[in-house]
Amino acid sequence: MRLLLKLLKALNSDASPWQLAFGLTFGMIVGLTPILRLHNLVILLLVLCFRVNISGFLLALAFFSGVAWITDPLVLGWGESVLTAASLQDIWTALYNTDLGRISQFNHTLTMGSLLLGLLLSPIMLFVSRWLIVKYRERFMAWVTKLKIIQFLKGSKLYQLYQQLQE
């Protein structure tokens, strides 16, 4: 619940829509793939190094971990077809013969298929989530701020005290 409230606070703040969208997108990729993989460590480092919304990342991670259970049969088939493609055998053999290739565990059908799904969906997720965030701020947030009760609450001493405590 606390993460959801932090995400709502970020949606209503002046945070960049791109920060929120990248948090949701990175959370989707990590949520769809098996958690203990090298590429997830790289994504986690990107999230921590750049200004990405962590609550959005964690909520997307939790949501897409559930989605991953549903899509596992489909993803296993994709991973197997990519790993057994005759034209790619030389690439997979060369990759597996390196230490980095074995650590990355791309030779597992679930890892390959789920990462492929995550990478294919990531541009769509990035732009759609940014568009939804902008539309949310334009329409819903503008509508809420026009409500008389919200204007009354913002004018009260309690709200001003709350704003001072946040700063």
Image: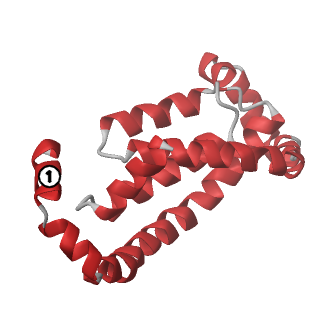
Q: Position of residue 120 (x, y in %)?
A: 64, 59
Q: Which residue is mark 1?
A: 163
> Which residue is drawn at the image coordinates 83% and 50% (left, top)?
70
Q: Nearer the viewer, residue 81 or 14?
A: 14
> Which residue is drawn at the image coordinates 71% and 26% (left, top)?
105
Q: Nearer the viewer, residue 118 or 161?
A: 161
> Which residue is drawn at the image coordinates 36% and 34% (left, top)?
48
Residue 38 visible in the shown view: yes
Give the amino acid type for the residue marked by disc 1 in the picture: Gln
Residue 32 visible in the shown view: no
Residue 5 falls left or right of residue 86: left
Task: Give the quadrant of the C terminus.
Answer: top left
> Which residue is drawn at the image coordinates 56% and 49% (left, top)?
60
* 10 Å crowding of disc 1: few (<14), some (14-19), many (20+): few
Q: How many marks?
A: 1
Q: Nearer the viewer, residue 134 or 155?
A: 155
Q: Nearer the viewer, residue 7 or 43?
A: 7
Whether 14 is drawn above or below 145: the answer is above
Whether 48 is drawn above or below 80: the answer is above
